[in-house]
Amino acid sequence: MSSSAQGLYSLATLIKRLEAITSRLEDVEDSRSAGHLKRQSTSTVTSAAVAETPSTPPPPPPPAIEVQSAVPRAVTVYDEIVIEGKLKPFLEINKAIAPPPLNEQVDLFAKVLATLRSVLHQAAACRNPDDKALAEILSPLQAGIEAVTRAKEAARKEREWFNHFTVIADGTAFVGWVTVQPKPGPYVKEIKESTAYYANRILKDFKEKDPRHAEWVRAFNGVLDGMKRYVMELHTTETIVDHHLQGIPVSEYKSSRSQLVSGPPPPPPPPQAGSTSSPAAPAGGVAAVFADLNCGADVTKVLRKVDKSEMTHKNPALRAGSVVPASAGAAAKKPVKPTKPQALMGKKPAKFALEGNKWIIEYQENESALEVANADITQVINLFACKNTTVIIKGKVNAVSLVNCTKTSVLVESVVSSVSVTKSPSFALQITGVAPTIQIDSTDSGQIYLSKQCLGVEITTAKCSAINVSLPVEGEEDGVFEEQAMPEMLKTVVQNGKLVTTIVEHAG
């Protein structure tokens, strides 16, 4: 083919391509004009309709729809036994006799029980939570117990009523049964027994003054008894969150409780006559690229600086693979293990004081030598909730009592009436003088040292084990003892219609 013919062929091809491009541009322009006319006509019709129709206020939103959810049986029984059956009578008698500070503390106590009701409702609706979620569920109970305790500490000037404040503060901890495994029922009984000391003081102090205080004590004990009955009926061998494999997650329960269920949203107000809206620019495509380029230097603001560890030209190891790993800092972080929920009962302040004729020694920990000096025959020594503590009592006292102590040692010279040990495992008791009676109840592991003058003592035990008595060795110097174990196995037979119990002796 000659050069002139080849040039004519190229020119013809170029003309055809230009015609095709011109045709496509004309089609695009026609489609844009048609769309613009359609939008303009629609806007005109809408404006005319708005001008003819008088403006009316938007209709009010429909009223909220109440959702009648079925109350779980655990909550209904709780309301029946605890709230309606026991708490309301106690609130009535308290309001009749109590001063304003005590009324405020009792109101806080009632709020704790209301919080427990919410916890029971949530536990019945949700599946088993993890430790973190359980800590969030129980945190309102912890805060409520602390508020009741603070009310007690703030009312120390109310000397006549301070025993009432103490009973409420110590008894509020009974809601902690929700964390006790495997049998939460006995825990409520233990809390009731821990309040018995101050409850008995109320009965004694107001026996002649006002009998209504005895009703107050009985009503408060009724709340604890009602809670124990509720726990024994519905949570005999499990807590509130055991075996809940069905239900919604805790997060969904919170969101559903926080939102009010209402009807459909109201329709939007009609557009104003003079308002015009421009169509939004299409996102993406070549137009979006040119729009970003027109921003100038601002287009680089969204870019982040590349770390040297992610640069392939500085790290030969990265060039071998096709994927750049995440930053080293993020990979080094280990997942945080969720913490277990803290105990509901916070650590209470230690106390060592003489109130009237009674020494009150409470919540002492790791004290090696607490000394009660110059005690007289009219004084009573009461130890409660002490741990790893040694108490030395100098002088002859009326009585000594240990309740809920752990690894507590007591050295006493002489006692007029008795020494009582209740629920105090691993205790140690030494009597250097005389004591007529030692009573031990619900205690495992204990050591008793008797002097030569105290060999006529009577020791009574109930529900105890591993109790040893060290007796002085005849003819030896002071301080030499021989340890003997108290019998634990008994044999009971029927003789002549009566039960006869003897100690089982092992031969050999």
Image (spheres, helix red, strand yellow):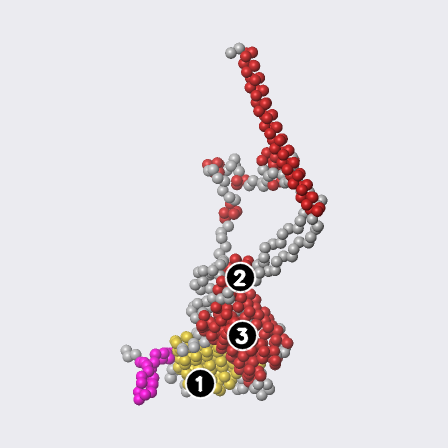
Q: Is residue 26 visible?
A: yes
Mark 2 or mark 1: name the one nearer the start of the chain: 2
Residue kind at label 2, given as amino acid type: Glu
Q: The residue tagged with tag 2: helix, strand or loop?
A: helix
Mark 3 or mark 2: name the one nearer the start of the chain: 3
Q: In the displayed structure, does residue 148 sit left or right of residue 232?
A: right
Q: The residue tagged with tag 3: helix, strand or loop?
A: helix
Q: Is residue 418 above or below residue 142?
A: below
Q: In the displayed structure, does residue 475 sit left or right of residue 143?
A: left
Q: The residue tagged with tag 1: helix, strand or loop?
A: strand
Q: Of 346 and 23, which appears nearest the observer?
A: 23
List the single residue furthest toward the left: 508
Quadrant for residue 185, please give it.
Answer: bottom left
Q: Give the range drawn in magenta.
A: 482-505
Q: Name the residue under label 3.
A: 84
- Circle 2 packing at 10 Å, graded few (<14), some (14-19), many (20+), is few
Q: Where is residue 335 in the image (x, y as percent from the top left)?
A: 49, 53
Mark 1 or mark 3: name the one nearer the start of the chain: 3
Distance CA(mark 2)–CA(mark 1):
49 Å
Q: Where is residue 138 in the image (x, y as percent from the top left)?
A: 52, 64
Q: Is residue 331 above or below residue 365?
A: above
Q: Where is residue 236 in the image (x, y as percent from the top left)?
A: 43, 71
Q: Of 54 and 374, which appears nearest the observer?
A: 54
Q: Name the residue under label 1.
A: 437
Q: Mark 2 points at which residue?
A: 136
Residue kind at label 3, given as amino acid type: Glu
